[in-house]
Amino acid sequence: MARVCTQLNVPRPERGYWAKLAVGKAPKQPPLPDPRPGDPLEWTRDGSPPARARPLPKPPERRGRSPAAPATPRPDQHPLIIGAKALFEAGRLSYGVGYLKPSKKLLVDLAVTRTGLDRALAFANQLFLALEDRGYRVVIAPHTEGFRRATVDQRERWEREEAERRKAEALKNSKAELHGIIEAWAAATRLEQFFADAEHRAAGLPDEQRRRTLERLRRARELIGSTDALARFQSWRAPDER
């Protein structure tokens, strides 16, 4: 019975209550506290949910200023977050989508990929602590409740994230290719200046030396290949063309 009272948040007689009651000195019975979010209102032996719906919990009361009581330091991590990372990482990946599916069911509810796990847990931790600072209780819902979260369309989210990834990759590759074309253009300009200057200088050489020099310049051009940077630029693709 004591365990059931604790579970339902029902006050129990303190030690020695019945002896005090026998001599007429029993303390006044405390009022039944309002249910907190997550507190069950009914108990059944077999654990089946109650047949009637429970009322919505009341928000925490706003109280005026009173002498501050010694407060326990707030933990850095909410109890629901402690140990959650290891349980998520030990789970499996949902098929074709990449969301973590931990084997343990009684766990903080997050739809998250492996790369986003740390950020999701950090955000949930800050949110839970902020809610409790304002008097709201953040707990796992009792099994007697019929709470259900909105269905997460994992395929749609994966496709949206994949499209964003491809868009970013196309932008990165397009920029890299354009920078390469600009560098090639600068190199082609220097080569053309070199060959033009060499041919101009060769024109003033004696016939035989001029012939040998022009032949070497021709072979050098063949070795370098085309220096037409404009042709390469025309093959460049913008991000939306990829």
Image (cartoon, rainbow, N blue to C red):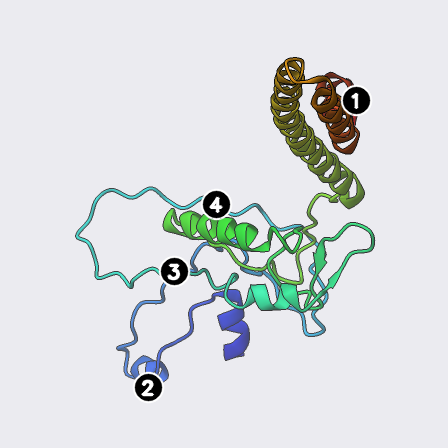
| Residue drawn at point x = 66 percent, y = 56 percent | 145
- The quadrant in which the N terminus is found is bottom right
Circle 1 Cα neighbour tier, 10 Å, few/some/many (<14 / 14–19 / ≥20): few
Q: Is residue 143 left or right of residue 240?
A: left
User: In what element is the residue under mark 2?
Assistant: helix
Circle 4 Cα neighbour tier, 10 Å, few/some/many (<14 / 14–19 / ≥20): few
CA gap, disc 2 to disc 3? 44 Å
Residue 19: numbered disc: 2
Q: Is residue 133 left or right of residue 188?
A: left
The amino acid type, in three-letter code, at marker 4 is Lys
Which of disc 3 and disc 2 is earlier in sequence?
A: 2
Mark closer to the observer (2, 1): 1
Which of disc 3 and disc 4 is earlier in sequence?
A: 4
| Residue drawn at point x = 29 percent, y = 72 percent | 27
The amino acid type, in three-letter code, at marker 3 is Asp
Which of disc 1 and disc 3 is earlier in sequence?
A: 3
| Residue drawn at point x = 70 percent, y = 49 percent | 148
Circle 2 Cα neighbour tier, 10 Å, few/some/many (<14 / 14–19 / ≥20): few
Which of disc 1 and disc 4 is earlier in sequence?
A: 4
CA gap, disc 3 to disc 1? 56 Å
Determine contact: label 4, label 2, CB under 8 Å: no
Residue 58: numbered disc: 4
Examine the rendered structure and indicate whether residue 134 appears above or below residue 205: below
Mark closer to the observer (4, 3): 3
CA gap, disc 2 to disc 1? 96 Å
User: In the rendered image, which residue does mark 3 sit on?
Assistant: 76
Is residue 19 visible to us here?
A: yes
Most foreground residue, 53 or 205: 205
Q: Is residue 47 left or right of residue 33?
A: right
Quadrant of res 29:
bottom left
